[in-house]
Image (cartoon, rainbow, N blue to C red):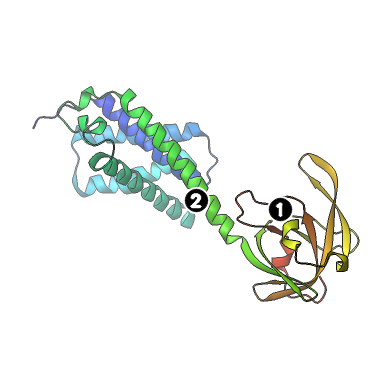
Amino acid sequence: MEQNIYLDVYFGFNFLMDFFVLFITKIAIRNRKSIIRTLLSAGIGALYAVCILVLDIHGIFQLICTYIIVAEVMMIVAYGKMWGINNIKSLCILYAVTFGVNGVINALYYEGVLKGSLLGRANTGTFGKVKIAYILPFIIVLSVVVVITAGKVKRNILMRKNIYNITISVGEKKIEATALLDTGNSLIEPITKKPVSVIEKERLKILDKEKLKYLIVPYHSVGKSHGLMTAFVADKVTIDKKNINNAVIGIHEGKLSQSRQYNMILHPDFIDKGDSDDY
C-alpha cells in the first residue's frame, strides 16, 4: 500500500514526542537547564528522524546512531555534560520514559479511546493530512497527566521513606504515633538545648496531664514570626528499637497532616544520634 508522508508533519510529530520525553526525563533527573535547551534538543531529534526517513537508513548503523550517538548528543544539548554513572543513569531514564510513552500511546491506539480515530488516520495512506493541531492537544494532556502523576508518586515514595512508628512512654502510659522525619526541623528548647519534635494534641488524651513536665518553647513559622509552643518531657521515646530518654515533645493544637499520613513531626537529631540516657 502506498503511503504519503509529509516531511513537515513528520518533523512536527517527532519534535513533539521528543520534547515530551526530554521534558519528563528533565523532571526525573532534576535538571535545571533552560527549557530552550530542551526545545533545541527535540529539534535535533526530529531532524535526525527526518534524515533517517529520507535517506532510508536501516540496520545496525541506524540502531547505533539512534540509541547511542544521537541520544547522547540530545542529552548533552538538553541537560549539559554528564560523566560516568550520572550519564548512564540519565540515559537509562531517557530510554525508560521513551518506552513508557510508546507503550501508553500503543495502548490508547489499540485498546483505548484513540482506537480507530486520531492516530488511526496517521496509520493510513493519508498520513500527511493529519494536522499537528490535532495531535498537540493529546500530547499536552498526556504530558500534564504524566507530570502530575509522577510528582505525586515521587512525593509519596519520599514521604514513606521518612515515616517512622514511634512509641512515647510517660510513666506507665504509652502512646503510639506515626512520625514524619522533617530534615528542616531545627526547633530547639532554648534552656536545655534539646531538639524538639511535635505531636498532635489529640494523641495525648490517655496521658495524665497533671503529671506531665511542661516547658514553653519559642518558635518561628510562616505567618507567625514569634510564637510560643507548649511542650512536655517524655520519659522515653522508642524509634526502631532505639531509646531516647527525657525527650522534649511539642504539642500541636490542630492536624499536622490533612491526609492523616502522620500525626507527629520528628526532629532529625532523634534519628541521627544513637541511644541516649538523657536527650
Q: Give the mark nearer the N terminus: 1 vs 2.
A: 2
What residue is rendered at 78% in x and 67% in y? 207
Q: From the viewer's perspective, is residue 159 above or below residue 125?
A: below
Say whether residue 81 is visible: no
What residue is rendered at 23% in x and 37% in y? 115
Dot 1 corresponds to which residue? Answer: 184
Left or right position of 217 against 256: right
Q: Amino acid at mark 1?
A: Gly
Frontmost residue, 104 versus 179:
179
Q: Element type at marker 2?
A: helix
Q: Judge depth for marks 1 and 2 and give the one in front.
A: 2
Left or right position of 27 against 194: left
Q: Element type at marker 1?
A: loop
What residue is rendered at 87% in x and 69% in y? 211
Q: From the viewer's perspective, is residue 120 above or below residue 103?
A: above
How far from the left and from the top, in percent, is residue 71? 36, 44
Disc 1 and disc 2: Cα gap in Å? 22 Å
Q: From the viewer's perspective, is residue 160 above or below residue 149?
A: below
How far from the left and from the top, in percent, is residue 180? 65, 58
How far from the left and from the top, in percent, is residue 238? 70, 72
